[in-house]
Amino acid sequence: MPPVVTPEVIWWALLPLLVLSGGGFLLLTIASLVRRLPEALPQAWTVVTGLIVLTATVPMWDRVQSDGPRSFLGGMVAVDGSTVLVTAILAIAVVATALLARPYLRREDLPGVELYVLLLMSAAGGVVMASADDLIVLFLGLEILSIAVYVMAALHLRRIESQEAALKYFVLGAFASAFLLYGMALIYGATGSTRMAHISGYLASTILVQDGMLLAGIALLLVGLAFKVAAVPFHAWTPDVYQGAPSPVVAWMA
């Protein structure tokens, strides 16, 4: 019987993901168990969580600069300079959005715990995306990020514009995800792998215009990503969604 090979896990590289997702789940658990939370607690919790992640990126950056990029979990996840940089940007965005959210929630008389929990989970999805070294992990992180934002866009229950914005964002987001997933399937069919390193090696050894399946897969992948980031000419959904969604959510989306 062949020995079972356990994939390598680099725990320090997973620290931002664990802090963000753990902070979100823990805040949700506390809010479920405690009948009346202090008003400032969810915001303070989110800000502190973001600052912890931002602080953790400093030794992570030093480690990457000294040891070089690392791939782990069977080559599905990687950590390099761009991963750490995107993680730091996400942490700053979490802190800024949390600071903007409380005055808005108080003015609109909205419950705040859900927004902060979804914000942390959305940021965790962004970290998964930044760490992805495989198309499947990339898609998983993108969907975690997107699904949380769909719900955040609909948090203003008394405004029909908010519900409309969330529905439009969800429908077009699902449309973009279908393009993205179909493109990944075609790329896998052409290259035989979803690993980005293998795909890069295949691209270096083939003439792209002579491989129709690979060309179609890349085109669909780019269309799906362009929808997600509202790149021209796939940006027509942004005015309605940005106008209807709560202001802190728009800041996070943008």
Image: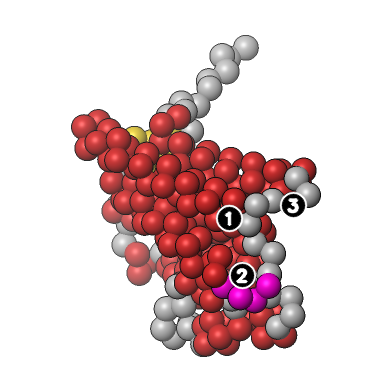
Task: Depth check: give the residue in front, 92 or 190.
Answer: 92
CA–CA distance in space, label 1 to label 3: 12 Å
Please tell me which of labels 2 and 3 falls first in the chain: 3
| Residue 103 falls within the magenta-colored stretch | no
Amino acid type, mark 3 = Arg
Q: Which residue is mark 1?
A: 40
Marks 1,3: beta carbons within 8 A: no
Task: Depth check: give the residue in front, 21 or 132.
Answer: 21
Q: Main secondary structure of the magenta part?
A: helix
Compared with 199, 224 (above or below) is: below
Residue at 69 percent of width and 51 percent of height: 37
Within 10 angstroms of label 3, few (less than 14), some, or many (20 or more) residues? few
| Residue 107 falls within the magenta-colored stretch | yes
Q: Which residue is mark 3?
A: 36
Q: Which residue is mark 2?
A: 105
Name the outermost residue toward the front.
38
Marks 2,3: beta carbons within 8 A: no
- Whether residue 116 is visible here, answered yes or no, is yes
Q: Position of residue 81 (x, y in %)?
A: 28, 46
In this image, 75 relative to 148: left or right? left
Residue at 46 percent of width and 37 percent of height: 14
Image quarter of residue 63: top left
Q: Position of residue 209 (x, y in %)?
A: 35, 69
Which part of the image, by quadrant, shows the C terminus? bottom left
Amino acid type, mark 2 = Leu
Q: Which residues are magenta?
A: 104-109
Amino acid type, mark 1 = Ala
**Mark 3 element type:** loop
Name the outermost residue toward the left.
66
Residue at 74 percent of width and 76 percent of height: 157
Within 10 angstroms of label 1, few (less than 14), some, or many (20 or more) residues? few
Please tell me which of labels 2 and 1 falls first in the chain: 1
